[in-house]
């Protein structure tokens, strides 16, 4: 949707895809990109399960050595969790 309006002889256009602070406009991924993402997720499942089982097998002391707790194991593959941990590591 575009909403043109005028004020004092100047013409402004407001667009749905306005960029904020130089950010790229928001676009939806196409069908091909979504199918690729779904296929990637499915192909990655055995790896994720193996890593999850390995982490579950570690003792609490071993998990503490790698800065994880039992409650963090489920979140290991969450991108937000990884970003938070990376930011904390850089700050330390």
Image (cartoon, helix red, strand yellow):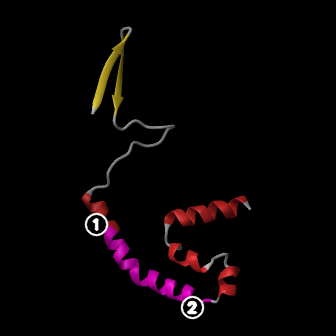
Q: Is residue 53 left or right of residue 84?
A: left
Q: Residue furthest front?
A: 71
Could you say whether the residue bearing mark 1 is in a helix, strand or loop? helix
Residue for point 56% across, 85% down: 55
Which quadrant of the rendered structure holds the N terminus? top left
| Residue 86 x/y as whole percent | 62, 63
The reply to whether the magenta stretch includes residue 46 is: yes
Disc ID at residue 57? 2
| Residue 19 x/y as whole percent | 43, 37
N-term mark: 1 or 2: 1
Residue for point 47% across, 37% down: 20
Residue highlighted by disc 1: 35
The vertical placement of 7 against 53, above or below, is: above
Q: What predominant SS class does the magenta segment belong to?
A: helix
Residues drawn in magenta: 38-58
Q: Quadrant of residue 90?
A: bottom right
| Residue 60 x/y as whole percent | 66, 86
**Residue 65 or residue 19, whichever sits in front:** 65
Figure label count: 2
Residue for point 64% across, 89% down: 59
């Amino acid at each position: 949707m575009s909403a043109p309006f005028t004020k004092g002889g100047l013409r402004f256009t407001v667009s749905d895809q306005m960029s904020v602070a130089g950010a790229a406009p928001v676009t939806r991924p196409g069908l091909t990109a979504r199918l690729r993402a779904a296929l990637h997720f499915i192909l990655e499942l055995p790896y994720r399960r193996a890593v999850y089982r390995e982490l579950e097998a570690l003792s609490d002391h071993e998990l503490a050595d790698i800065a994880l707790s039992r409650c963090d194991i489920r979140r290991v593959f969450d991108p937000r969790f990884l970003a938070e941990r990376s930011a904390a590591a850089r700050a330390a």
